Image (cartoon, grey):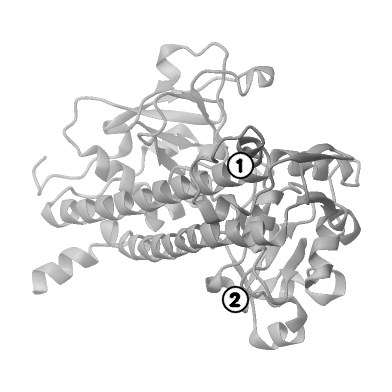
Amino acid sequence: MASNSTPPVLGEIVRLVRGTTYKSALLGQPGPVLLGLASIQRNGGFRTDSLKTYGGESKPNILLQPGDLFVSLKDVTQSADLLGAIARVPESVTAGRLTQDTVKLEFGDSDYPRDLVYWALRTPAFRSYCRKHATGTTNLGLARDDFLAFRLPQPDRYVLDLVELLEALERRIDLLRQTNATLEAIAQALFKSWFVDFDPVRAKAEGREPEGIDTATAALFPSEFEESEIGLIPNGWRWSTLGHVTAKRGGVIQTGPFGSQLHASDYQPVGVPVVMPQDLAGRRVSEDRIARVSENEADRLSRHRLKSGDIVFSRRGDVGRHAIVSGREVGWLCGTGCLLVRPAADESISTFISAALARPESLEWLVRHAVGATMPNLNTKILSALPLVWPRDEVVRAYEHLASPLDQRVSANLAQAQSLAQLRDALLPRLISGILRLESTEN
């Protein structure tokens, strides 16, 4: 496309293929990944933490492959963060299926770069365009004609160079996320082997050397089991609760500020970050939409300030969600709707506790004991009563020695990914504003 030609509107480049409804009873069965609203990040990008497969009928025209682009033309909230938001199917999703809430961008014969379409629809200019053309009062919608009327940027050399840089940043961010997924899987596998399947104990009971651990670590495990109220557990281990383990080590379980302690009017654009339930994902704190309060408010609520090793727990809704606090979040506040679990005052057991809380059995117990007919709620009493199998202290220390560095590496990778994402977001406005072109010309 010539650089002096008029840049096209979306409708000249793509046509839309709308998805269809699905049967909820078939969720989780083998099949393509559902690409609905939950698979798109706020303001664009693919979201991996809520993916579900679908085992029902999927016509070929609504199936997507890696690299395909899809968009939401609706938002079930008033924020419009998902209205017109675009995502690209990653390599890790070999097959995806549209839902009734999403549309696929099907490209014609135009030579307009597909990557430029993707990034143009990630820009603040496009996000503003979507909000301006939103319809509806409860659920927001974006008409097809309005979506397709958005004018794309001119694909000149400067814009294409910027797209190349944005792609490089995206690849690096994705690599960091993949690395973290691998590290998380290693830590979970280690916890399951030691504290759920009791592999080292079973090996010793059968006269075998435990696999994957050195002789000194293997010596920490007993060679026989004993009966307990939940069945066989390793000899010398005990059946306990989260509250007992926490209190015995000088820790606490408390609620975050709520009621008259913190109001919506207290939040502001800059200040001390406040961790809310919506910020908890994958045992980590997400900064996508972190709330903040002034230093004065933070000082008033100083008992809720976070320390390294704390665990922030959602006390309502998705009650199994929690995050372990790293050095990056030290000094932030445990916010409204959260419970603060401070496992120990003088020794590190946070990685073990966090891994135990993430087990399916723990999540099921919390959901079953939560109170509330319409929305599950936890309180300090319920969370304190969560049952745990507690090993000998030296075994916990051995696990922390292996798993805690993995957690620290995950946190460091998240911080780096966040920095790269901030750089990406700072560059995005230049894709349409022309600032990059102007600067390049002046140089």
Kindly state the secondary structure of the residue where label 2 is placed: loop
Mark 2, residue position: 330
The number of callouts visible is 2
State whether residue 288 appears in this view. Answer: no
Mark 2 residue type: Val
Specify few, some or many for label 2: CA neighbours under 10 Å numbering under 14, 14-19, or 20 or more: some
| Residue under the image location 20 percent in, 65 percent down | 436
Mark 1 residue type: Pro
Determine whether, in the image, residue 99 is placed left or right of residue 24: left
* Residue 403 position in % (x across, y down): 54, 56
| Residue under the image location 63 percent in, 22 percent down | 27
**Real-space Cα distance between discs 2 and 1?**
36 Å
* Residue 366 position in % (x across, y down): 81, 45
Kindly state the secondary structure of the residue where label 1 is placed: helix
* Residue 397 position in % (x across, y down): 62, 62
Of circles 2 and 1, which is in front?
A: 1
Q: Which of 348 and 371 is in front in this view?
A: 348
Of labels 2 and 1, earlier in sequence is 1
* Residue 106 position in % (x across, y down): 33, 26
Quadrant position of residue 396: bottom right
Q: Nearer the viewer, residue 318 or 145?
A: 318
Mark 1, residue position: 200
Q: State which quarter of the image contains the N terminus.
A: top left
Q: Nearer the viewer, residue 134 or 356?
A: 356
Position of 57 relative to 37 (above/below):
above
State whether residue 261 appears in this view. Answer: yes
Quadrant position of residue 394: bottom right
Specify few, some or many for label 1: CA neighbours under 10 Å numbering under 14, 14-19, or 20 or more: many
Quadrant position of residue 28: top right
Q: State which quarter of the image contains the C terminus.
A: bottom left
Q: Nearer the viewer, residue 74 or 135?
A: 74
